[in-house]
């Protein structure tokens, strides 16, 4: 049995995570983890950049939201061994193919940030 210290210092124990099978990716199993604080800060920078003047067009908003989602997706996707699949250097590659499957996986990871029991109490 692991000590409390070992558990508290484990990368796997620092974040909620789930393992899911992705049928669209030949049934591969992946690990989804709740986003890190750093990823949320990068997400905020994309969603609300300090230099925006005026209203964004629909296309600009869609592009901004896509970039924000890709930022989080890169942070939450891990292989079964708990190793990151992507790095920040892969942003353009992920952005070029990001679609509904990626969005569904991101949604599952985001759902990890809200504990069902916590949600019931609100």
Image (tube, rainbow, N blue to C red):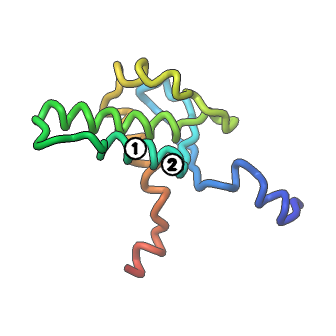
Does residue 103 appear left or right of residue 4 in this picture? left
- Residue 48 at what x, y percent from top left? 29, 46
Q: Badge 2: how crowded within 10 Å, few (<14), some, or many (20+)?
A: many
Callout count = 2
Residue wearing tag 2: 35
For marks 1 and 2 on the same chain, the one whose residue lies earlier in the sequence: 2
- Label 1 vs label 2: CA separation? 10 Å
| Quadrant assignment for the C terminus | bottom left
- Mark 2 residue element: loop
- Residue 21 at what x, y percent from top left? 51, 37
- Residue 82 at what x, y percent from top left? 67, 38
Does residue 39 appear left or right of residue 5 in this picture? left
Please tell me which residue lies in front, 46 or 32: 46
Dot 1 and dot 2 residues touching (CB under 8 Å): yes
| Quadrant assignment for the N terminus | bottom right
Which residue is drawn at the image coordinates 70% and 35% (left, top)?
A: 81
Which residue is drawn at the image coordinates 57% and 34% (left, top)?
A: 29
Dividing the picture into quadrants, the one containing residue 106 is top left
Question: Eyeballing the image, is 1 above or below 86?
Answer: below
């Amino acid at each position: 049995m692991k000590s409390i210290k070992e558990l508290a210092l484990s990368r796997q124990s620092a974040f909620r995570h789930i393992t899911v099978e992705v049928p669209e990716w030949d049934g591969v199993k992946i690990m989804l983890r709740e986003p890190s604080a750093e990823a949320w800060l990068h997400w905020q920078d994309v969603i609300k950049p300090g230099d925006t003047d005026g209203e964004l067009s629909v296309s600009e908003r869609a592009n901004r939201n896509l970039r924000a989602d890709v930022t989080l997706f890169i942070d939450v996707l891990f292989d079964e061994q708990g190793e990151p699949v992507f790095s920040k250097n892969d942003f353009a590659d992920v952005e070029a193919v990001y679609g509904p499957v990626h969005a569904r996986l991101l949604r599952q990871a985001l759902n990890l940030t809200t504990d069902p029991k916590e949600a019931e109490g609100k």
